Amino acid sequence: NISVGGTLTHFAAPPVLMVAAPWNWDMSFMASNFGWKAALGILISNLIYFIIFRSQFAKMGKQDEEEASTNFHTPEVQTLKPGQISHEEFEARWSEREVPIPWWVTLVHIFFLAWTVYTAHYPALFIPGLLFFLGFLSLTATHQNKMELKGPIMVGFFLGGLIIHGGLQAWWIAPVLGSLAELPLMLTATVLTAVNDNAAITYLATLVPNMAEASKYAVVAGAVTGGGLTVIANAPNPAGQSILGRFFENGVNPLKLLIAALVPTIIMGLCFMIL
């Protein structure tokens, strides 16, 4: 969902961001050529998996009701307010609380989100905006989750390194991608994405001179389609693994992840190829 959902706009996902400027793809282009197909594929895939796991979803609801009666989910915890306990304990019990966030905090978050999108290519404006946002987080810490900067910074270094060193790969990637027809190119991009980050695949495609429009579509469609096959296929995947890994006894199994991702991958591939 995250990989293909990034095609709804020209700035939402690294593989699209890598090609948006070189190929002059704007939001209207992405929405009309990729976005609605991605939305349809996501709807079909999620509906199928909902039907398959509906019994487990029902059990999860009953389990939540049972946990609500334990001391861990007491009404006292759910109605905690800032200042009643230490910030560290307040943060640790974030998921248990039901106290609404002040509207002005949400509004400021939306403002900084819009500011970041608008100034993404203007460091002189973006960096001060980031610093002001971090200051706002510090001042309103009791209403905030813990800020995790390690993941985004590592993704930023990866994309920066890709742009700096990616040009050195042009000598072999240009002939390979340039010699493939649309369908083989899309399938190749999907397979390569499983063992490479999909942003790397699309960036290398920008190094191919005079690439046909149909080939551009094929390589991006293939790259985002394969974004769920492995943990390394899409930049947000490691973050998802760190969040959900605790629900798996021995961590996320790469083979089982690949098998589970095959059905939605095929569905998304068909949506991009046929529609």
Image (spheres, grey):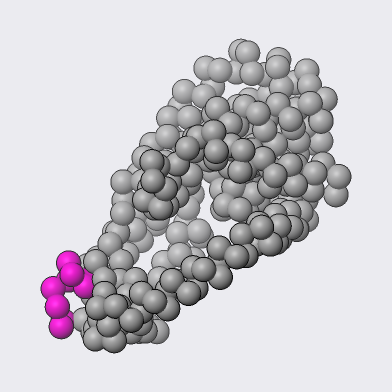
Q: Nearer the viewer, residue 60 or 260?
A: 60
In the rendered view, tell whether residue 106 sits above or below residue 51.
below
Q: Residue at x 26, y 74 (%)?
A: 72
Give the quarter of the image for residue 46.
Answer: bottom right
Is residue 161 toward the left or the right of residue 258 in the image? left
Is-magenta flag for residue 60?
no
Count how many numbered circles sit on residues in the image: 0
Q: What percent of the width, then of the height, locates residue 234?
A: 53, 40
In the rendered view, tell whether residue 255 sits above or below residue 180.
below
Residue 65 visible to an observer of this rendering: yes
Q: Nearer the viewer, residue 165 or 146?
A: 146
Q: Residue at x 74, y 50 (%)?
A: 34
Is residue 144 toward the left or the right of residue 160 in the image? left
Give the quarter of the image for residue 146.
Answer: bottom left
Q: Which residues are magenta?
A: 83-91
Residue 31 visible to an observer of this rendering: no
Is residue 186 toward the left or the right of residue 158 in the image? right
In the rendered view, tell whether residue 41 sits above or below residue 109.
above
Q: What percent of the width, then of the height, locates residue 119?
A: 47, 57
Give the quarter of the image for residue 265.
Answer: top right
Is residue 24 toward the left or the right of residue 11 in the image? right
Q: Residue at x 45, y 64 (%)?
A: 113
Q: What percent of the width, then of the height, locates residue 18?
A: 57, 39
Q: What percent of the width, then of the height, locates residue 7?
A: 65, 51
